[in-house]
Image (tube, coloured by chain):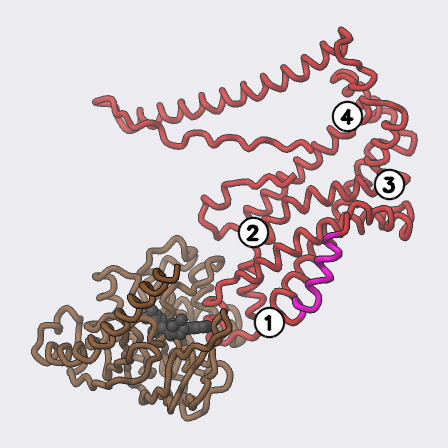
Amino acid sequence: MTAEIAQPQAQREAPTQTPAGASEQALAAQAHARVLRHKRLVLLGQIGIAAFILGGWQIGAMTGVIDPFFFGSPVGIVIRLWDWGLNGTAYGSFWLQIWVTLEEALLGFLVGVSSGIVLGVLLGEIPYLAEVIGPYIKIVNALPRIVLGSIFVMWLGLGLPSKVVLAAVLVFFVVFFNAFQGVRSVDRNLVSNARILGASRLQVVRHVVVPSAMTWIIASLHVALGFSIIGAIVGEFLGSQRGLGLVIATAQNTFDANGVFGAMLVIGALALSAEALMAMVERRLLAWQPPSNTDQNIQGL
Amino acid sequence: MTAAADTPGGVDLVGVTKRFVTPTGGVMTAIRDINLSVAPGEFCAIVGPTGCGKSTTLTLAAGLERPTAGTVTVSGKPVDGITKGASFVFQADALMPWKPVIDNVALGPMFRGMPHAESRARAMEWLQTVGLTGFENHYPHQLSGGMRKRVSLAAALINAPSILLMDEPFSALDVQTRAIMSNELLNLWERQRPSVMFVTHDLEEAIGLADKVVVITAGPGTVKAVFDIDLPRPRGAVQDIRFEKRFLELYQQIWGALREEVEQAYARAADATRNQGNTA
Ligand SMILES: Nc1ncnc2c1ncn2[C@@H]1O[C@H](COP(=O)(O)OP(=O)(O)OP(=O)(O)O)[C@@H](O)[C@H]1O
Ligand SMILES: [Mg+2]
């Protein structure tokens, strides 16, 4: 998946040489200009790399150094996407395929996250349950979960449910383990304090345990988001009538390299926008944290 | 703002022993056969060497733990479950970092089912009392250590506790802030008059605040001596009274009792380290 390399933080503080007589404002303006210049340089470098790779690929494909049959070409990819956008695919419009995959991933994400949180909090709060159920969860977790996809397709058919379940299962384990760990690492003092102030067991869970585990849970959501998309696409790959996974599978079967890359590109764009959305939600939910903690963006894909 | 009417306050510990099971499976006696009583409205300071079981004693009074032997009675009722009418101020901040100051102070009334608007209004009053008006929407990490302690105090006192348990509440503060906070604590205590159990390592603080200072022996702790502090109230700042003759006398007496225990605890700790060094 297209994982963006974390951008180095622009230098916050300018070197503190103070030319005699320079006013604070001039210094600030200078520092600001330096930061801007740095940002521009980084951007330029990034564009440069993209241009180099894409350009090299295109030229290679045109001169025959790279076999366009197997590797496609950037222009070919754009033409293929354009064609899909205009004329659709053999099984409905391209937009429909995107929507189908999104819907499966989103539903799987929601089901997986909510069940992961509920079970994680339950097992974290009730040690007896954790001891009884814990080993089973470990066993299921040890299964190669992608293979479960085949079983779900057999059981639930080629439609939406099998993909949602696969995505949900992938998401569930990530969220569950984090929620469980988060609940376990709640500050005992906070719990004692709440109990002394008169909180019932449920109130402790609601006002202390869950908010405190939230940091852990949210950290898992980035990875979970990527998994939900992977789950949907793998599910479609294994058997479906619609969706981006099917688009890739079809392109693969017809040796349409441009098609495979094109669909990959679309999936990457989806994942990145979902990631951006996630970062926004995260910032809202963790507004109480000191800013340094919410600044860093954990890349999950 | 008076002490809860249904619970008169007062704490009685009779023959209280508490043992813990250590992670290695052994048994560790934290306190043994403690007899201690704090009258309603009395301010009791507890001093003793580190590890002697002061915090353990407070958690027993709060009902967070059960004694292994003996009985703990608060407001005339044996403690089973969380003690009614008790508030606890911990050494480390026990504020919810994800709640703004006002919601932290309003926790007690909220847990007890008071309507939202009313509990917030009460919390605002308390913030005013502890001098934090204007900070209600700050998060705890945006406050200084002293301000956080004030929030903790407000959050503890808003429940109008009949017993107030404080475990080294001011030990993380600088000397000046600590003096100010001690003064404020006395003022607040005069309003509600809860029974107070105040754990501290600072003997001056103990004498300056309390009606009675209890010295606990090196662990497993038990009561070594109880000193009545007959300094007149209102006392004013510790800084102002600590050179008075009676204060110095009391200090000498109590330090005499405490010193042996501190030295013994220290010697034991040093021994343990040496033994570990030998076996390693
Ligand atoms: N939950 C527990 N499990 C096992 N041992 C414990 C537990 N709580 C306390 N202890 C032990 O009991 C002893 C007394 O602990 P306690 O925290 O009450 O000491 P303290 O007097 O408050 O010390 P300090 O002044 O350093 O805070 C210590 O030796 C400690 O290791
Ligand atoms: Mg302690």
Instruction: List the residue tagged with mark 2.
Output: A285
Q: Chain of mark 2?
A: A
* Mark 3 Cα shell of 10 Å, populated few (<14), some (14-19), many (≥20): many
Q: CA distance from mark 1 to mark 2?
A: 21 Å
Distance from disc 3 to disc 2, alpha carbons, whole Å, reads: 36 Å
Measuring from the top left, give residue A119's x and y in whole percent: 68, 62
Report which residue position mark 1 lands on: A202
Compare residues B224 and A67 and report the one nearer the observer.
B224
Q: Is residue A64 above or below residue A151?
A: above
Kind of residue at disc 3: Leu
Give SS at disc 2: helix
Q: Is residue A231 above or below residue B208?
A: above
The residue closer to the viewer here, A250 or B85, is A250
Give the chain coloured red.
A
Q: Position of residue B102 (x, y in %)?
A: 43, 63
Q: Residue furthest top?
A: A63
- Label 1 packing within 10 angstroms: few (<14), some (14-19), many (20+): few
Precedes in sequence: disc 3 or disc 4? 3
